[in-house]
Image (cartoon, helix red, strand yellow):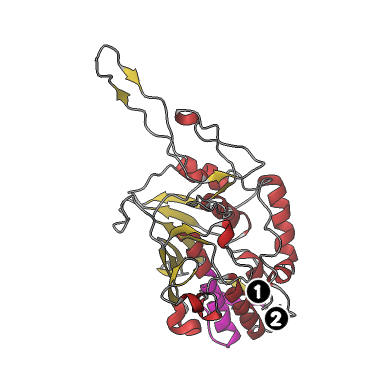
């Protein structure tokens, strides 16, 4: 489970978005119409529901109402109110580089008790695989099993995924903002995380978190702080088969009504027949096609109209965001793979 938490100007806090999940679609399951969510890891779903929360707050401004986080500027865009902060809580160490954590080597005694051996220094494993063309895991015993600072894709059973690890995605959010390309055209400044918080009952190393998320960021930057709670996350699932179902919620009842809470499976709404699963009725509010539609509606309310175009063309209109990302990517993430052609060319 992951959640984005708003810290208001008075110091009070509230959860504004939430997601659960640990599965991804394989490469051959992806849709080219933007109707399926390919990555259902909790951190990614929480961030997508956070985008809905931001759209909801911008929609309030467009309706002439007060937003709890935004103010409207003379340009028509919005900016954050002073002292507004956002925090990310996640119940487990992000997959990928942040999960490569040193283990404590304990002395081990062989059965004959004649010689006392010291176990090899070792690290916790990650199932995320290094992307082709970049550094690869040596797969040697002990601490040399993994390489670090490599761009990785999430593991998949059978059909491999092309979804990048949560460590890599969070690092990107910290480099260029969690708002993404579309919202960068509606808000004046990137929106950054103030902190990332994990519970006490999961593998944790601040050194590994800093390495995976912060060390690759360009300088100067404003990286998040990392904290480990003294409390356990009591709802952790015991090790076993990943749950195929995800829960999504955002504080957007004024915008989406009952659809501010949705249950997902295989990147679509849960509980629909196969005939309806691939229709608009089966779409989650956080899929690319629905985010495209929400952007069009909210930008029109703000008087920032964009000509009808494909999702990819719309993202390319965010030239300041895209130019900055290209510079950061070439310097800090040279192995970051390009999205395959055809997967973002759908119209509104």
Q: Earlier in the sequence, mark 1 or mark 2?
A: 1
Residue 95 percent location from the top left of the image: 48, 49
Residue behind mark 2:
304
Is residue 188 something one can see in this rendering?
A: no
Secondary structure under tag 1 reads: loop
At a point 54% along the width and 44% down the height, the residue shown is: 129
Are discs 1 and 2 less than 8 Å apart at CB? yes
Q: Residue furthest front?
A: 275
On screen, residue 160 versus residue 108, left or right, reads: right
| Stretch in magenta | 50-73
Q: How many labels were placed on the picture? A: 2
Q: Quadrant of the N terminus?
A: bottom left
Tag shown at residue 186: 1
The local crowd at label 1, few if under 14, some if 14 to 19, many if 20 or more residues have their Cα within 10 Å, is many
Q: Residue at x 33, y 18 (%)?
A: 117
Occupied quadrant, residue 300: bottom right
x and y, in percent, of residue 275 in the image: 50, 78
Up the image or down, 46 lies above or below 136; here it is below
């Amino acid at each position: 489970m992951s959640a984005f938490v708003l810290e208001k100007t008075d110091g009070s806090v509230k959860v504004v978005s939430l997601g659960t999940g640990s599965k991804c679609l394989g490469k051959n399951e992806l849709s080219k119409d933007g109707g399926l969510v390919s990555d259902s890891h909790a951190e990614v779903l929480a961030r997508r529901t956070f985008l809905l929360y931001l759209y909801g707050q911008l929609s309030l401004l467009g309706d002439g109402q007060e937003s709890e986080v935004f103010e409207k500027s003379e340009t028509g865009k919005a900016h954050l109110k002073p002292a507004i902060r956002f925090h990310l809580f996640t119940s487990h160490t992000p997959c990928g580089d942040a999960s490569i954590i040193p283990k404590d080597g304990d002395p081990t005694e062989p059965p004959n008790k004649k010689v006392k051996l010291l176990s090899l220094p070792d690290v916790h494993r990650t199932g995320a695989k290094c992307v082709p063309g970049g550094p690869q895991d040596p797969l040697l015993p002990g601490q040399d099993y993994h390489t670090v600072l490599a761009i990785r894709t999430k593991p998949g059973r059978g059909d491999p995924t092309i979804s990048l690890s949560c460590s890599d995605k969070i690092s990107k959010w910290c480099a260029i903002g969690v708002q993404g390309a579309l919202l960068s055209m509606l808000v004046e400044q990137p929106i950054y995380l103030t902190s990332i918080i994990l519970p006490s009952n999961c593998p944790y190393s601040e050194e590994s978190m800093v390495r995976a998320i912060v060390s690759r960021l360009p300088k100067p930057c404003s990286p998040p702080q990392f904290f480990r709670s003294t409390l356990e996350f009591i709802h952790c699932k015991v090790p076993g088969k990943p749950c195929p179902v995800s829960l999504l919620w955002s504080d957007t009842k004024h915008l989406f009504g009952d659809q501010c809470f949705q249950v997902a499976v295989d990147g679509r709404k849960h509980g629909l027949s196969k005939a309806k699963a691939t229709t608009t009725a089966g779409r989650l509010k956080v899929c690319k096609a629905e985010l495209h539609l929400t952007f069009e509606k909210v930008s029109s309310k703000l008087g920032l109209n964009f000509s009808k175009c494909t999702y990819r063309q719309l993202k390319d209109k965010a030239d300041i965001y895209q130019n900055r990302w290209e510079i950061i990517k070439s310097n800090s993430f040279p192995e970051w793979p390009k999205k395959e052609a055809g997967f973002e060319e759908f119209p509104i």
